Image (spheres, grey):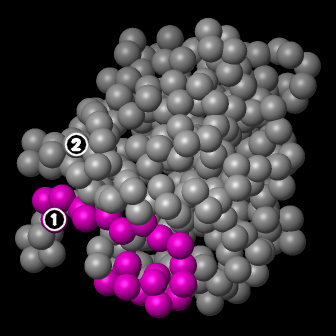
């Protein structure tokens, strides 16, 4: 085994800095940052037979949000919630009649926004992204299946229920990060595009992710480490019930990822009897090493810089503007 302690290996360098540790308060309760009753009223209008699509946005990305919303209306997804990270965003979404949930981010000061993580997030970016799993947990506990996608992940098709059939948790497969896990599985789970079924197993798993987020601000590390520590085993043969052990290190992760991109991989967490699905990168697209056929892509989530101009430029390159 290459790493004695996978959690430590993945998290090192991505721990919460002491000055931002109060941002983790939302991992215990969202009551301090949003009005649960107002949210409940919105949720109560939704049907449990359909997934709720969730995204998060702040005013720095309203241009990207417009594009995200225009794609959502094209594919006729009606059951969704946009988490608004500041007053301007809430007003903008209200003006567009977009179902939203306004949050008051703690410890945020525009003028003193000095922190930037090695992954490119500002303090405000971390304050909003740490809401992902607590928010998803809240909806799942209320009995809704949830598809969370980043604001820079465009829905090009209404996701058919068959993609998630028999799965308790599903996610977009990505290739690079955290590298310690990607080089063993040949992929990792994306923190910006995942799906949870409304059941106790999924809630238990979300709680594990949330616990790991108490030490790392990186939701993608937390998601992957939670899978790892749950002893997930992947069936990478494509249906022959041959689950690989953790020691199968992939020699060339990128070419393996590309070669396998049309496949969906299923995994099991035996202790909980949980089914985990790593979705096909050809359909849930992110890394440009995977051949792109936009007519087949369900969610288009290209790697892009962490600036609005940079993201819009990438989308434009692919014909979205
Ligand atoms: Mn993203």
Q: Which residues are magenta?
A: 88-108
Residue that label 2 marks? 25
Quadrant of the rendered image containing residue 298? bottom right
Q: Nearer the viewer, residue 213 or 312?
A: 213
Q: Seen in the image, is 4 located left or right of residue 254?
A: left
SS for callout 2: helix
Q: Seen in the image, is 90 located left or right of residue 250?
A: left
Closer to the eye: label 1 or 2: 2
- Location of residue 203 in the rendering, given as x and y in whole percent from the top left corner: 53, 30
Q: Is residue 99 magenta?
A: yes
Ligand 1 within 8 Å of disc 2? The answer is: no
| Residue 44 visible in the current orientation | yes
Q: Seen in the image, is 240 located left or right of residue 76?
A: right
Residue that label 1 marks? 108
Distance between mark 1 and mark 2 Cα atoms: 14 Å
- Location of residue 283 in the rendering, given as x and y in whole percent from the top left corner: 79, 57
């Amino acid at each position: 085994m290459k790493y004695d302690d996978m959690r430590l290996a993945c998290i090192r360098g991505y721990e919460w800095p002491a000055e931002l540790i109060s941002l983790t308060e939302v991992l215990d309760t969202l009551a301090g940052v949003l009005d649960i009753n107002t949210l409940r009223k919105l949720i109560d209008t939704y049907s449990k037979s359909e997934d709720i699509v969730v995204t998060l946005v702040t005013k720095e990305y309203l241009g990207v949000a417009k594009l995200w919303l225009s794609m959502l209306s094209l594919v006729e997804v009606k059951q969704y919630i946009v988490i608004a990270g500041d007053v301007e965003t809430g007003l903008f979404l209200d003006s567009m009649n977009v179902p939203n949930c306004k949050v008051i981010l703690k410890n945020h000061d525009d003028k003193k926004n000095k922190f930037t993580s090695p992954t490119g997030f500002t303090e405000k970016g971390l304050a909003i992204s740490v809401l992902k799993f607590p928010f998803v947990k809240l909806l799942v506990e209320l009995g809704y299946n949830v598809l969370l996608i980043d604001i820079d992940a465009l829905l090009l098709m209404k996701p058919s229920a068959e993609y998630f059939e028999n799965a308790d948790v599903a996610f977009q497969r990505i290739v690079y990060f955290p590298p310690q896990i990607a080089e063993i599985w040949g992929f990792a789970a994306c923190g910006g595009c995942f799906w949870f079924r409304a059941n106790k197993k999924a809630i238990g798993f979300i709680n594990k992710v949330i616990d790991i987020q108490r030490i790392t601000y990186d939701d993608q590390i937390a998601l992957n480490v939670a899978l790892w520590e749950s002893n997930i085993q992947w069936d990478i043969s494509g249906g022959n019930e041959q689950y690989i052990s953790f020691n199968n290190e992939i020699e060339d992760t990128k070419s393996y990822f590309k070669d396998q991109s049309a496949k969906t991989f299923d995994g099991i967490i035996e202790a909980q009897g949980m089914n985990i699905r790593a979705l096909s990168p050809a359909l849930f697209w992110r890394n440009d090493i995977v051949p792109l056929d936009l007519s087949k892509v369900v969610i288009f989530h290209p790697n892009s810089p962490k600036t609005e101009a940079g993201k819009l430029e990438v989308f434009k390159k692919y014909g979205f503007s």
